[in-house]
Image (cartoon, rainbow, N blue to C red):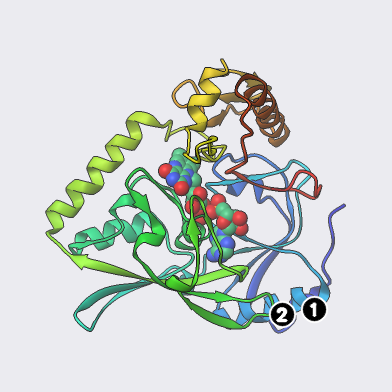
Amino acid sequence: MAQKFQSTFFGGLDVDFEHDAQVGAMTNFAIGGRADVLVTPRSTDALSLLMRRCHNSGTPIHILGKGQNLLVDDIGVEGVVVKLEAPCFKSHTYKRIDQCDTMHAMAGADLATVLMDSARHGLEGLTSMAGIPATIGGAIRMNAGGKYGEISDRLQTVTCLTSNGDLVTYNAKELEFDYRKSSIPAPVVLSATFELEESDPVEVRKRVKEIFKWKKTRQPLAESSAGCAFKNPLNDSGERVSAGLLIDQSGLKGFTVGGASVSEHHANFIVTSPSATARHVIELMEEIQDRVLDATGIQLHNEVVVWSRDEAVSR
Ligand SMILES: Cc1cc2nc3c(=O)[nH]c(=O)nc-3n(C[C@H](O)[C@H](O)[C@H](O)COP(=O)(O)OP(=O)(O)OC[C@H]3O[C@@H](n4cnc5c(N)ncnc54)[C@H](O)[C@@H]3O)c2cc1C
């Protein structure tokens, strides 16, 4: 049941808000339901105050990045969804400190835009992120990466907001970044600094193109998906094995539930047709987990984040 917020909840807050907002449509899957309210703060202070009000009233709060690793259930998501799209959350700047090139980026900044701009400035450090669709905040939360590296490789500091709305800055060395996860204790990543290196702009751009080309030949980048559906699991020897290979070996390429299918191009991508619902994707993922477990004895775990009013479905 959608919760209606009293307009006093947002009184004195410098935010835009929309009740019963179609947030599923804002993900790359472009399917799924609504949030009780979508809030777009216009400043860090407004976001901080919003966090405090949500904390004090026990209202769940979710941060929406670029929606590239996210599935919103058809029954929607409870509470406040925050989108960091005001200009103050999208900027990035460069500084040279102690002969070291650093970049400060706000969490709502588009990773590809930041990457291409740093390449134009002849600054190397984020090229491994080529072809990964994300905001800076979403990429840090997920420790996005792949064959060429992870976003945490060049991370210096991460500034966050606690659930009570307080600002806290962590040195990246204090945090743990592992395969597609971070130990950041605060719910909101607000900004980050990265250490970059001066290089030849032509060479940096060439490397970005090479990595993007590599990704394009292996993944269905143009289709509706959330990237890899499952994390690559650990085998008995503690080595990561390809979830895509396990799904393929279980005979599931092309396997379909409603409008959701296992990609023929890359078996760890679930791609959707216009008739798909979020439940088709969820049922397909459960079916893949069961069949891979039966065929290989290995349990797959979600990489895709699922938001749902049903706690048993949220991941
Ligand atoms: C075609 C395609 C290819 C992809 N390839 C890769 C790949 O090679 N490697 C890889 O790692 N991923 C890949 N992905 C997945 C996706 O790009 C990453 O997970 C990315 O980090 C998601 O960022 P986002 O901003 O879209 O986050 P969202 O999908 O919006 O959110 C993901 C999670 O991060 C949280 N979050 C977002 N912003 C913040 C914030 N500011 N503070 C706190 N929490 C936040 C959300 O609440 C949610 O839990 C791919 C996806 C697609 C569609």
Instruction: Measuring from the top left, give residue 106's x and y in whole percent.
Output: 44, 70
Asked whether mark 2 and ligand 1 are closer than 8 Å, the reply comes as: no
Q: Say if 167 sits above or below 154 in the image.
A: below
Say what secondary structure mark 1 lies in.
Answer: helix
Q: Closer to the camera, 38 or 169?
A: 169
Name the residue carrying label 1.
Answer: 56
Which residue sits at x=79%, y=68%?
Answer: 59
Instruction: Measuring from the top left, give residue 184's x and y in whole percent.
Output: 56, 67
Q: Say if 99 sits above or below 40 in the image.
A: below
Label 1 environment density (alpha carbons within 10 Å; few <14, some 14–19, many ≥20): few
Residue 259 at least partly seen: yes
Instruction: Measuring from the top left, give residue 128's x and y in whole percent.
Output: 31, 50
Residue 268 at least partly seen: no
Label 2 environment density (alpha carbons within 10 Å; few <14, some 14–19, many ≥20): some
Instruction: Measuring from the top left, give residue 44's x and y in whole percent.
Output: 55, 79
Name the residue carrying label 2.
Answer: 52
Q: Closer to the camera, 296 or 228?
A: 296
The quadrant where residue 97 appears: bottom left
Which residue sits at x=50%, y=37%?
Answer: 237
| Number of numbered discs overlaid on the protein picture | 2
**Residue that protrudes farthest toward the right in the picture:** 1
Three-letter code, disc 1: Asn
Three-letter code, disc 2: Arg
Label 2–label 1 contact, CB within 8 A: yes
